[in-house]
Image (cartoon, rainbow, N blue to C red):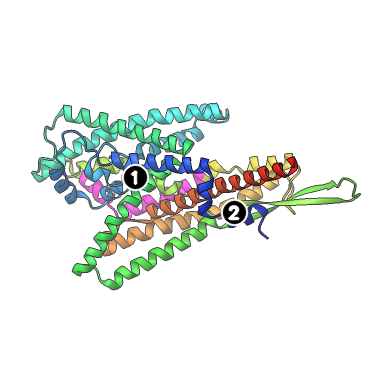
Amino acid sequence: MASVSEQIASRINLGSIAKAEDLKKRIVFTLLGLIVYRIGSYIPLPGIDPVALEKVFSANVGGILGMFDMFAGGALGRMTVFALNIMPYISASIIMQLLTVISPQLEQLKKEGEVGRKKINQYARYGTVFLATVQGYGVAVGIENMSNSQGVQAVMDPGMFFRFTTVITLVSGTIFLVWLGEQITQRGIGNGISLIIFTGIVAQLPVALSTTFELGRTGALSTLFIVFLLVMSVAVIAFMVFIERAQRRITIQYPKRQQQGAGSSVASSSHLPLKINTAGVIPPIFASSLLLLPITFVSFNAGSGPEWLNTLSQFLSRGHPVYLSLYTAMIVFFAFFYTAIVFNPKDTADNLKKYGGFVPGIRPGENTANYLDFILTRLTVIGAIYLSFICLLPELLISKYQVPFYFGGTSLLIVVSVTMDTVTQIQSYLLAHQYEGLIKKSNLRRGK
């Protein structure tokens, strides 16, 4: 049976947003922040010839550069101030989380609460500057090399000054996006970093669809195959929503307590929900980010570099077994890694024991921790298989049928997850507003 809050939430409609002033302000702030991001994705780097750049990039857009451009919302193809997008920050955050597990000092810092979390985030920002600097220099050198190899002068005045200004501009753009994402998280709706990635992906969707339909019009793709792609996309989205909402509910029993004046005792129970995909969209984002870090350099310099660099570029191209194997291994690893970070069975068992809760048939303490770990491990295996399937299916279709529609599994998962999280937050604000209205009415009636 649905709870009272669920019944109220089911009656909430978007028309009530007009009455929630705080929610309206948050939505407007979020939209303005994302508009600023989209405007910045069209501001070109200094010293770039846009027409020549389009020719250079169109010849190299296949493979991993297309994926990078998708996450950047087309900013890489236009070589704008936001060409690196938010990916260096995500890579730095991954490294910091890995170091937190390895380093006792960082692990102790994490246990210090809000103060420790702020220090770790500050270290992640320092790492973002370093990674963005390295990637920015690689992008600058890569543009010059691609221009020279194709005889097209995309860079008006190549040299150290161009590389210096490019690095400064790209690093500044990434740091600004990190700040903008944090502002959206604090003063807007949803997670700002995720919404920035979400916006970049959705912005490229019309282009990908129009390209696919144009190929269908010219006969490069059959109409039946395009219909199959659209139907499959809808089916995959429905499957993803089902899995993202699925959870294993573990019954938690609390000891009997005496009812006042009744002379009887009652036992209370609740449930501990464990999602099938506890890690959410984090494993594909982490895997893509770590793969993009070295592949960016390899892809930009493969044409003019040594032979082993060309071979490595082929191995890391989309659809190659080596790339698919690395991608799958990283998704599985981060699924288990991030689940272990967000849910600790031992701490959960200790908290249940502290407040008198227990799982029926399982002894409190260590036995409960082992039981929760056993359940969570099985769920994570299913979640890792689900994430791997969702992310590899489009990759196989793209590599086998040469579909230009690169709106792949990772991006689709990000769009669905971010949409669900944002809608949930909006419903929470509306629910809180409705409760606030009921409390005010109750106080007025008492005042009478």
351 in magenta? no
Residue visible at 34% across and 45% down? 291
Residue visible at 38% across and 63% down? 233
| Residue 319 in view, yes or no | no
316 in magenta? yes
Q: Position of residue 435 (x, y in %)?
A: 63, 46
Q: Position of residue 272 (x, y in %)?
A: 65, 50
Under circle 2, the secondary element is helix
Q: How crowded is mark 1: few (under 14 residues within 10 Å), some or many (20 or more)?
A: some
271 vs 395, left or right, is right
| Residue 106 in view, yes or no | yes
Quadrant including the N terminus = bottom right
Tell me the tag on residue 239: none
Quadrant including the C terminus = top right
Who comes first in sequence, dot 2 or dot 1? 2
Q: Out of 174 and 374, give the one closest to the viewer.
A: 174
Residue visible at 35% across and 32% down? 175
Q: On the image, numbered disc 1 is attached to which residue?
A: 291
**For the residues marked 2 and 1, what is the alpha-carbon distance in whole angstroms?**
41 Å
User: Magenta region, mostly helix, strand or loop?
Assistant: helix
Q: On the image, numbered disc 2 is attached to which residue?
A: 9
Residue furthest out toward the front? 448
Quarter of the image for residue 208 reads: bottom left
Q: Specify the amino acid type for callout 1.
A: Leu
Residues shaded magenta: 309-338
Q: Out of 328 and 238, give the one closest to the viewer.
A: 238
